[in-house]
Amino acid sequence: MTLLPKSPRGLRHIFRIKIKTGLLSLLLFSIMAVTGIVTVWRVLVVREIWVDFASDFNNAEVIKEQLSDSLGGKPLVFLSEKATTKLLQNKFPEVSNVSLVKRWPTGVVAKVSSWTETLVVGTASPFFLVNNRGLIFGTSDSKDSGTYLPIAISGNLTVGQYIDFKNLGSLVTISNFMKQENLVGKFTDIREDSVSMLVAQTVVFLPLDTKVNSALESFWRIYKNYQINGKVIKTIDVRFDNPVITE
């Protein structure tokens, strides 16, 4: 028996059936996927919240309430540390970061941290508590609450705003260097382009620009050499290429 080739009409019919079957399968798969997502959305939501404070907060209870309101009922899979941190910072500038640890299926642990590098800025009480980006996150009646920077603040600044001092980063660099080398220093005068500080019995003059790192290295090298020889230096000025020393 000889098999005759199928007519073009028959081939088109078979092709249409295959297309319809494929589309129907795709539709069924899409419905199942959407149903699954909706089920996860409704079931795996935050119902339990534990808050862990990495440091002391005066308004810890209020922060807990805010976290409960913002995270409660949200799908666990879509929680964002970045969005949660930003939400809290808008109301509580003293918050530096919020990390989230998900406890499946319905719990989350929120760890709230404050700024570790605190700068105390101002010339009279109340002083501003400032982070290393210049954000004012609180006030204090004492200048001993962190690294004291006697910078005169102009204008009516409040918590949540930024201080306008272009070389704040250089001051933070100097402060970190002093801690790294276990040196105790006190800023005595801060200007737009330079700073003086008292280290033991020595007055040190430093630039507040891109040369601050090399200036610190130069100061430390000179200071250590004099310490080894048992000598006291009155001043070390490393604002320029050639350091000036007064014994």
Image: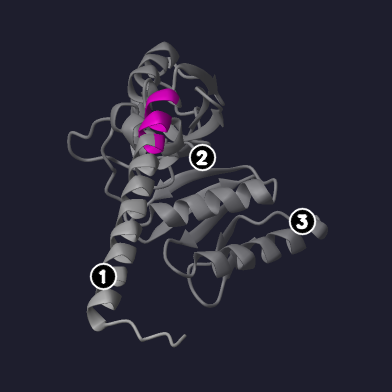
**Helix, strand or loop: magenta stretch:** helix
Residue 5, horizontal then vertical, whole percent? 35, 86
Residue extent of the magenta highlight: 36-43
Residue 234, horizontal then vertical, whole percent? 61, 55
Mark 1: give few (<14), some (14-19) or many (20+) Cα within 10 Å. Answer: few
State the SS at label 1. Answer: helix
- The foreground one among 101 and 94 is 101
- Evaluate if marks 2 and 1 touch, with contact meaning CB atoms under 8 Å apart: no
Q: Is residue 98 above or below residue 58?
A: below
The residue beneath circle 2 is 117
- The foreground one among 26 and 180 is 26
Q: Residue at x 38, y 40 (%)?
A: 32
Q: Which mark is residue 13?
A: 1
Q: Is residue 184 above or below residue 219?
A: above
Q: Amino acid at mark 1?
A: His
For the residues labelled 2 and 1, the Cα–Cα distance comes to 75 Å
Q: Is residue 196 above or below residue 101?
A: below
Q: Choose mark 3 or mark 2, whichever is in front.
A: 2
Point out the image quarter for the C terminus. Answer: bottom right
Mark 2: give few (<14), some (14-19) or many (20+) Cα within 10 Å. Answer: some
State the SS at label 3. Answer: helix
Which image quadrant for residue 238? bottom right
For the residues labelled 1 and 3, the Cα–Cα distance comes to 97 Å
Q: Residue at x 51, y 35 (%)?
A: 99
State the SS at label 2. Answer: loop
